[in-house]
Amino acid sequence: MPKFPRFILGVSVAASVLLVLPSIAQAQKTKKPAASTTKTLDQRLDELIAQMTLEEKIGQLNQYTGDAATGPAVTDNNKLSQIQKGQVGSMLNVKGAARTRALQAEALKSRLKIPLLFGLDVIHGYQTTFPIPLGEAASWDLAAIRQSAHIAAREAAAAGQHWTFAPMVDIARDPRWGRVMEGAGEDPYLGSQIAKARVLGFQGEQLGGTDAVMACAKHFAAYGAAIAGRDYNAVDMSERALWEVYLPPFKAAADAGAATFMNSFNELNGIPATGNSYLQRDILKGQWNFQGFVVSDWGSIGEMIAHGYAKDNKEAALEAITAGSDMDMESRSYGPNLPALVREGKVPEALINDAVRRILRKKFELGLFDDPYRFSNEKREKQVLADPQSRAIARDVARKSIVLLKNDNNVLPLSKQAKTVAVIGPLGQSKTQHLGFWNVSTDSTQVVSLYEGLQNKLGKTAKLLYAKGCGITGDSQAGFADAVKTAQQADVVVMAVGEARDMSGEAKSRAEIYLPGQQEELIKAIVQTGKPVVVLIMAGRPLIFNWTADHAPAILYTWWLGSEAGNAMADVLVGDYNPAGKLPMSFPRSLGQIPIFYAAKSTGRPSANDKDTNYRSAYLDMPNSPRYAFGYGLSYTTFDYSGLTLSTKQLKKADKLTVSFTLTNKGKYAGEEVAQLYLRDVVGSVTRPVKELKDFQKVMLKPGESKTITFTLDQDKLAFYNPSMKWTTEPGEFRLMIGSAASDIRLEDKFELVD
Ligand code: NOJ
């Protein structure tokens, strides 16, 4: 997990990548470059680039790390002088208004006074930490997701940042891959909607607003399909899978105006993404007409040597710039090699001009040439980071992210009669773990633990007990006896189990994704007391917990929920908030089922049900179905679907199909349902998945209330890539399914697309 050293008086004291700066007072005296208001942006760019030497242009393509390493660290004691000479265009991992201001002053000592761009991994919050992105995706609440990204941007922009390396829009279908925590799950449609919401949230009304930062859609492309879920592994993928599954969220991010893209560590069908012209030039900058710039991933240009694609850094630089990687994050390949490559005629200067223009354009759009310090305002930083409203929103997003997996005999919400509540498990009093892998700036003491959340909620009416039981990992059951004794004294037990925050994330792939250590054994011991037990699972990925799924009466999947974790969980536990989250990834029963996803193909011998194995596409020892399907999640109430109506059964190609039905809340609690629309194109010139999510709506209903829900399907929703990879529709039958989960279809009909 990224580790930031403590900052003392604006100077970092504990990093190998340490940068020693002049005092802040000194920095503030530095003169700003003159602002110009009358010229167009292109004129300003032309003028500036015309003044730049080749070395100065290449300097803009270099990005160095500052006070922390979020990749293999490079030792460089000479960074400051390179910044002063204009040999660095951007810094990552420099935090805070004062610190960025001081460093900016150094860049302004350069001949052309070109300001630095500051970038940081603000993945799910800057100071106010929101749920991990996979958790937020479980809210299926696009407005909430957009708002959370916007608050993250507002805080980051007040603390000197211009740019976040988010959203990660990689589709992921293998929960062994640690980075599933950072994306929106397995589905291209949901993933695209969320990609758009996050880009719009980060970038606000307009780039240049002091409440907005540049977004960065990453990792381009197909990083989520690493073989066997092992991070950084090769990707071998059909053109069809690339276009149908992995590219759509990137396209959505580009269409939403993402200012930047980051390429990826993986090779794609033999060519590293960083050196891949097809991805970066043909698709992104060509077909999609992307006008922003592409940053490499940390060291990924140099890593083309280890991939076996370049013989040395010079060749790696040649491959990367040719393929369209504009900025070199920390591989130190561009600075030392591009000047010679241009002089030798191997790299046309036009390529350098294009890259530098893309980067400078963003600096202009951010307003940095008019005021290089406009994001480094300590007063605003203080105010924005102290805004209590952000915590309130974080709590709301956190409770929206929780998924109710099981609730036998309505154990939940907790009965108001419960006078003694036992919190048991290694995550019961934890604060730090809720911050997830990418905590940027949250002091863990500010995080609300589950125990504290329950204390806040029940402190006056019930007695809270606590026993840890065991560690998150490790073999010891020494705490079991105490945990059992504690459970026996309680009316109800709330168990807090899961992963530590450094078990899912970058380079955190796991071959075994069971509940780690002795935790499932602890659950067994507690369930055997006969007390009502609610299990809360806190993790960065889908885990396997079959015994718990079979025997625990109630299960909530809470991911890592961020600053307000405990309050959000308490809201759900006592029923002040009715859970409405739905899984954005299938949860396997067994490692052997991975990769597992709902939008699978039928095969020629589909298994009619989980038991049909006779010459069928099935496992002898395991059902095909997941433990919990994509889109699944319960509520304290129940919803009834009825009255499906299609505007036509014979849809003409030029027309739209209107689909409506009635959704009714049949239970006692007000609640939200995410109604999901799936399609199957029954026969095609290319086989289509058995189900594809095409739309959804999240609807709030009071007890007994009904609403008519309407979806409109245009031709785009019926289209696919034909055998010539042309995006088109074909006449024929479609199955339309409306449901509460991919595994829980409530209404079904057919229609025909006609010429
Ligand atoms: C490597 C990660 O893959 C990327 O997502 C991140 O933005 C960079 N490191 C910078 O920390």
Image (spheres, rainbow, N blue to C red):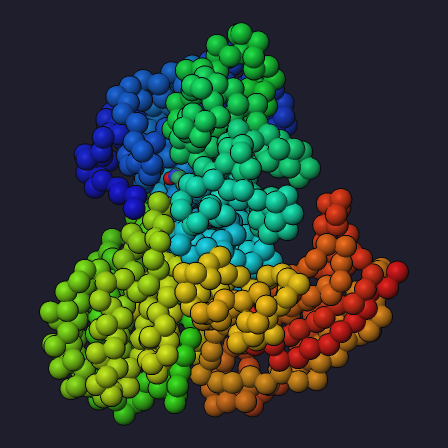
Q: Nearer the viewer, residue 170 or 578?
A: 170
Query: Which quadrant would the C terminus be assigned to in this image?
Result: bottom right
Can you give x and y, in whole percent of width and height, for residue 750 in the image?
76, 74
In percent of width and height, residue 147 lies at 48, 58
> Does residue 69 sit above or below 667 in this rendering?
above
Q: Residue furthest front?
A: 615
Vertical arrangement, residue 230 with respect to residue 54, above or below: below
User: Quarter of the picture for ligand 1?
Assistant: top left
* 209 on left or right of 80: right
Q: Nearer the viewer, residue 651 or 208?
A: 651
At 42% from the left and 19% from the top, the residue drawn is 312
Q: Splitting the image into 4 quarters, where does residue 67 fall?
A: top left
Relative placement, left or right, of 683 versus 328 is: right
Using residue 727 as the reference point, say whether residue 291 is left or right of it. Answer: left
Q: Position of residue 733 (x, y in %)?
A: 78, 67
Which x, y percent locates residue 69? 30, 36
Front one among 399 and 683: 683
